[in-house]
Image (cartoon, grey):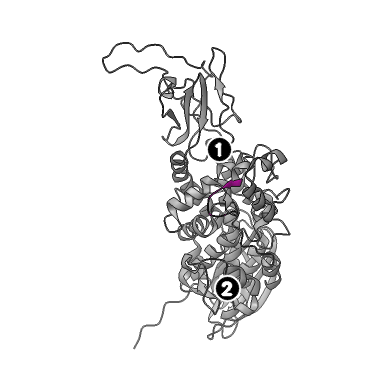
Amino acid sequence: MKKALAAFLVMALATPAAAWEPQTTQAGLAEQAALASRLHDRLVELGFSGGLFEALTIPPADAPALMQALKLLSPTHGTVPDARGRQSALSWIAAGAALADIPATSGANHFYDPSTGAGWTKPDRDLVESVSDKVRQAIGRAALPDRGVPAPDWVVAKDNPFNVEAFYAQYAKAVTAGTPGERSRHMAAALVAAGAILHTLGDLGAPARVRGDLAAQLDPLGGGPDDLGSRFERIAALAYGRLGVPAPARVITRTKLREYFTAPGTAVAAPAPAPISPTAAPADGKAAPKAPSLPALGPVVAPPVEPMPGEGLANFIARSYFSPNTLPAPTRMSDDAAPVLARPAPSLPTRLNLMSATRDAGTTLRNSSSTCLARYGVESNLITFTLDDDCMLEQVTAILPEVAAYETGLLQFLLRGDLTVDVDSSVTISGTNLAAGTLTIVAEDLSGVRTIVANVNTTATTGEAPVALAKIGKPANAERIYAMYRGTDAAGEPIVAVGAQTRPAAAPEK
């Protein structure tokens, strides 16, 4: 654990990263995912009786680089432990989400364009040189990397010390370690890794990150020469902070880790929207004068404004929203011209309301849930599309609950895997849908010290009915029995499955 934390944090920079803002939006999303998931119950089952509110300690001497990085965070945001390295389980997972952009170059690994499979690529020279001198200087100090690892690959990359394997390693030790202090330290480390993984997924909820719109991450935001990032993501932080981040709209379930990040999904037929009329009848009921209009763009099937079955977050957001630099192109109105789309989706309605678009304020393009997708207006026979702050705020409001739903599902996925521990004169461990792996059985005594009493190589289990993985004699002086399996599930995905003996009811007082 110490080596992993040091490798990840020794190069920590104070420069703000371009992401859902770590101490507000990202910490809030991780907290909402934790609250909506089974994490509380899992912690209680594993002996952390306070669940999400159990105080867990990482001694500062064990992880000096982590403590140094945590000092970069504001104590008012609830993610900084006390001088002993102690804070609640919920705060540790939020801390992991807040730290995932440290060092600043790690933020380059939080992009993924499902149409190309590409992650971050440094914007071209013309783009970088088109910004102000102040911004150019800031870019130089931030040392933008040329390329980043695509987000779905980063969470399993070997050079990411907070990858999925690191989570499972710490999670397993939180079950099998001998003393309560050791288990506390390992569980806190596992939650930090889980928070960083959730952060990487959550960043794919920002449209620019999944539509190849890298320029949108380099806007000067006004907080100083180094304050570069996404205006869209800054609006989320200003509007919702940390505590205001909404709860998940649902819990997304997938069978493979990567499918939370990217998967095409199964299209669901939807009725075509009613054409938007290019004319509007005057109040006196007389026929309105004919207005210039673009030709019909062909039949449009309205995509659902929620994830399709099996769809990854990147795919869902990329097809559902524009980003600032992937809006339909400005178009000169003529009988045979139509706005050029950067991507097939979101699609435009068959007719645009050009009567309203000619007004000074223009008009709004909305999806079937009435969320603003863009503003458009006509001036000098040219139709242009824009995104203003109010429109982006509507999108943030619609997107955040969906991101929380994916993050909750991913956290549930990491925590999946249940073992049944039956204890009478012997101990029987059962499980379902597990491939061949290794089972560790642990006995805890009255003082809370755990001892490994057996390591068993198991065979694969199939079907939904529990299958006995191992049976051993009941250990002497065992107050409680725990079991931990490491291997893969029936879908071939890495898994740590755990279980604990159900505590017997307390004897009535005499």
- Choose between 367 and 16: the one closer to the eye: 16
Query: 266 above or below 273?
Result: below
- Asked if residue 220 is among those painted magenta in the image, a careful observer would answer yes
Q: Residue at x 60, y 44 (%)?
A: 209
Secondary-structure class at tag 2: strand
Q: Toward the viewer: 320 or 212?
A: 212
Which amino acid does the dot numbered 1 rest on? Pro
Which residue matches tag 2?
Answer: 482
Q: What is the C-alpha distance between the residues marked 2 and 1?
A: 52 Å
Q: Which residues are magenta?
A: 218-224
Three-letter code for the amino acid on which mark 2 is drawn: Tyr
Residue 461, x across and y down, in percent:
64, 57
Horizontal arrangement in the rendering, residue 400 relative to residue 123 (left or right): left
Number of the label disc, if any, that sits on residue 324: 1
Judge the density around disc 2: few (<14), some (14-19), many (≥20) Cα neighbours within 10 Å: many
Asked if residue 166 lies in the magenta stretch, the reply is: no
